[in-house]
Image (spheres, rainbow, N blue to C red):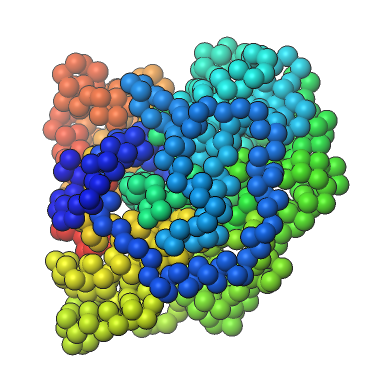
């Protein structure tokens, strides 16, 4: 398939795995980037190895220390089950598998294999229940047919759908599953709880844009929803997509030695991400609405799990929907795919407010990932723990940083109190105490630990070459690292082999030993996200950097929601400074359909723009429609074609626009992570 530049290893059952991959990995890496659906060629899992004795020992300790006899979560995850699709299978166009639980059938074994942390194995099993579930009268959920949940509330004349999953295909299949088991009533309203794509991307599988435009369906969302839904994914979209592959293990085949879970869902569905702009924004901290006979109190919780988010309370049903602010896992204050850090203090406060306001009148607590919690006492306990896990991490990390400790030290020192440490719902399957503690430091103090030795160290390759040379050369380092590997010191071996690989990426022994160490770390990880990251790193050390297809940074649907202003910002971050050296340029842009005007200015190798104006003296003036700009951004047509077709008219110097476009970089998705970059800047 040529996915890898060097396919040095072939797994014995590679053909079988490849076929399996075809169905599993053809992928939409949009969960984290909101971008176009892309196909990733299947890969071969290169030589995944067995668990080492130290890993088995670590797992035995997990089995001893955690309350595996407590099976209440399994009861709640299955409670109210009505029906599902066989194997949870959802097909897209041309019988493409968009979602299937069949690849996870290996998780039916009660006992965790030696290559999976038993706590993660338990969490993965809890994520395997899929289908339509009744929460209480008039409140239903579809779970396990995508990474997230769809909640369906039966209103007087129709349905209110809360969150529409990531893909239109899984959303449509979820509605169909509901209709096969309940009355076929029209959707009267959709609610997006927050600005992450796994909560709105499937909207066109639930309602049509025509129905929304005609006012037959309202779409409710928290204030500032649109700008955050698209903002995060555009400017840094390429890096997010690549890093997201590590977080979700998107190139790993599911299996005992591969991907087992995503931490609070199985994986991302691989369908079509769609967009319809919300019609009704919730702007007050608490807002009571009546939608078709159903009272809903919205509670805005901005700056918690997402920059725009809200929870919902249903007084008639005594149901509280905490969106994604409470989960059966510690969530992320920082996500490994890369994102701005979240505010643990605020997040905790919102949960505390919800507990205070709704705690004594809630009989079922639901969320937009994972299973519900029933019963006043269980709900209160659950909410308190969720409230406190984030407050604890925040306060203790800040306490330690005020004592002068730095991120790596804080991550090592801070330990959960026993009352939270041995509770399933606050274990780190998605976020971890380690990286969340560092996130708190980052929020307040940023990347610099104040030690000037770390102010401007040599970059990785130079640093690694010197270090390896000082340590007596690569062979000496590898020999000693083998002994450390045998002793189970995987963190150190992974780190020191990383140096040898950066000093010389062709050193096969270093790549192999580094991969072996990352793999054992992956097997030991309780967090699905860490496991995925470690195993992706191991795979790429063994097989090389994947060659991934170039994809558009935008999905056609989501491009609608992107302001022209943001498009110009996105073009500006593609400016190649070396090519722009010494050049100046002023270009006027006039959009005939939207009436927008912009001056774009190139000067000092920086591209800036000013909206609402045209320059009196410009090198060129471009007149076009937004639709034409979108078509070019989606690579549906080229700039010269659009000019030839008369869709773009240019006044002044006709060469200027082409010159500017020629200075913009294209970003390659498959950039190296576990080895040095090529000269590709
Ligand atoms: Zn989500």
Q: Quadrant of residue 41?
A: top left
Residue 674 locus on image (x, y percent): 28, 62
Where is the N terminus found, in terms of image quarters? Answer: top left
For image coordinates 74% across by 53% down, the residue present is 383
Q: How many marks?
A: 0
For image coordinates 71% across by 59% down, the residue present is 385
Q: Is residue 599 left or right of residue 6?
A: right
Where is the C terminus found, in terms of image quarters? Answer: bottom left
Residue 152 locus on image (x, y percent): 66, 27
Q: Is residue 304 left or right of residue 490?
A: right
For image coordinates 17% across by 81% down, the residue present is 475
Q: Is residue 91 above or below residue 236?
A: above
The foreground one among 101 and 623 is: 101
Is residue 306 visible to the viewer in this orientation of the structure?
no
Q: Is residue 94 above or below residue 51?
A: above
The foreground one among 221 and 250 is: 250
Is residue 452 visible to the viewer in this orientation of the structure?
yes
The foreground one among 399 and 570 is: 399
Q: Is residue 382 above or below residue 368?
A: below
Residue 271 locus on image (x, y percent): 41, 30
- Outermost residue, right side: 360
For image coordinates 81% across by 42% down, the residue present is 362
Q: Is residue 450 above or below residue 599?
A: below
Q: Is residue 661 left or right of residue 31?
A: left
Residue 345 locus on image (x, y percent): 66, 60
């Amino acid at each position: 398939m040529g996915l890898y530049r060097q396919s040095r290893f072939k797994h014995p059952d590679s053909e079988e795995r490849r076929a399996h991959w075809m169905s599993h990995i053809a992928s939409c890496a949009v969960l984290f980037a909101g971008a176009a659906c892309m196909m990733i060629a299947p890969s071969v899992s290169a030589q995944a190895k067995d668990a080492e004795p130290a890993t088995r020992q670590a797992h035995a300790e997990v089995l001893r220390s955690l309350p595996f006899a407590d099976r209440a979560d399994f009861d709640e995850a299955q409670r109210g089950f009505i029906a599902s699709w066989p194997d949870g299978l959802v097909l897209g166009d041309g019988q493409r598998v968009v979602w299937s639980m069949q690849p996870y059938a290996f998780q039916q074994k009660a006992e965790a294999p030696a290559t999976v942390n038993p706590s993660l194995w338990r969490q993965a099993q809890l994520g395997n229940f899929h289908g339509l579930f009744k929460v209480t009268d008039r409140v239903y959920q579809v779970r396990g047919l995508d990474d997230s949940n769809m909640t369906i509330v039966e209103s007087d004349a129709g349905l209110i759908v809360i969150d529409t999953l990531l893909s239109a295909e899984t959303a449509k299949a979820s509605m169909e599953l509901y209709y096969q088991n309940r009355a076929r009533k029209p959707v009267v309203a959709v609610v997006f709880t927050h600005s992450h794509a796994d909560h709105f991307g499937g909207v066109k599988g639930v309602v049509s844009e025509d129905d929304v435009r005609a006012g037959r369906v309202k779409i409710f969302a928290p204030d500032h929803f649109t700008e955050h839904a698209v903002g995060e994914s555009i400017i840094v979209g390429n890096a997010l997509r690549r890093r997201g592959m590590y977080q979700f293990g998107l190139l790993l085949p599911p299996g005992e030695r591969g991907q087992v879970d995503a931490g609070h869902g199985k994986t991302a569905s691989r369908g079509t991400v769609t967009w319809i702009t919300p019609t009704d924004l919730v702007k007050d901290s608490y807002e009571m609405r009546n939608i078709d006979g159903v009272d809903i109190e919205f509670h805005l919780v901005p700056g918690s799990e997402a920059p725009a988010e809200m929870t919902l309370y249903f007084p008639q049903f005594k149901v509280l929907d905490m969106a994604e602010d409470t989960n059966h896992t510690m969530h992320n204050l920082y996500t490994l795919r890369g994102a701005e850090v979240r505010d643990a203090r605020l997040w905790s406060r919102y949960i505390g407010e919800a507990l205070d306001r709704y705690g004594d009148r809630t009989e079922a607590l639901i969320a937009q990932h994972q299973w519900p919690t029933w019963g006043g006492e269980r709900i209160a306990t659950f909410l308190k723990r969720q409230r406190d896990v984030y407050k604890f991490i925040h306060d203790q990390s800040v306490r330690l940083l005020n004592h002068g400790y730095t991120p790596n030290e804080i991550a090592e020192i801070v330990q959960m109190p026993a009352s939270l440490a041995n509770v399933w719902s606050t274990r780190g399957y998605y976020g971890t105490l380690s990286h969340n503690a560092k996130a708190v430091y980052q929020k307040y103090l940023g990347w610099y630990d104040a030690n000037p030795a770390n102010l401007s160290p040599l970059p990785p390759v130079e640093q690694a070459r010197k270090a390896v040379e000082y340590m007596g050369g690569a062979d000496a380092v590898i020999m000693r690292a083998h002994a450390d590997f045998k002793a189970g010191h995987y963190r150190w071996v992974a780190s020191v082999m990383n140096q040898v690989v950066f000093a010389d990426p062709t050193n096969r022994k270093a790549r192999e030993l580094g991969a072996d160490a990352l793999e054992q770390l992956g097997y030991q990880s309780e967090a699905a996200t860490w496991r995925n990251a470690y195993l992706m790193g191991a795979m790429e050390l063994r097989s090389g950097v994947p060659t991934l297809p170039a994809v558009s940074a935008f999905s056609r649907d989501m491009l609608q929601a992107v302001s022209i202003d943001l498009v110009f910002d996105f073009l500006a971050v593609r400016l190649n400074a070396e090519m722009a050296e010494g050049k100046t340029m002023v270009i006027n842009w006039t959009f005939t359909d939207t009436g927008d005007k912009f001056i774009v200015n190139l000067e000092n190798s920086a591209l800036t723009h000013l909206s609402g104006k045209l320059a009196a003296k410009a090198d060129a003036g471009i007149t076009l429609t937004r639709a034409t700009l979108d078509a070019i951004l989606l690579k549906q047509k080229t700039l010269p074609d659009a000019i030839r077709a008369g869709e773009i008219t240019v006044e002044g110097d006709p060469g200027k626009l082409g010159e500017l476009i020629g200075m913009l970089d294209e970003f390659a998705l498959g950039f190296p992570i576990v080895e040095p970059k090529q000269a590709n800047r």
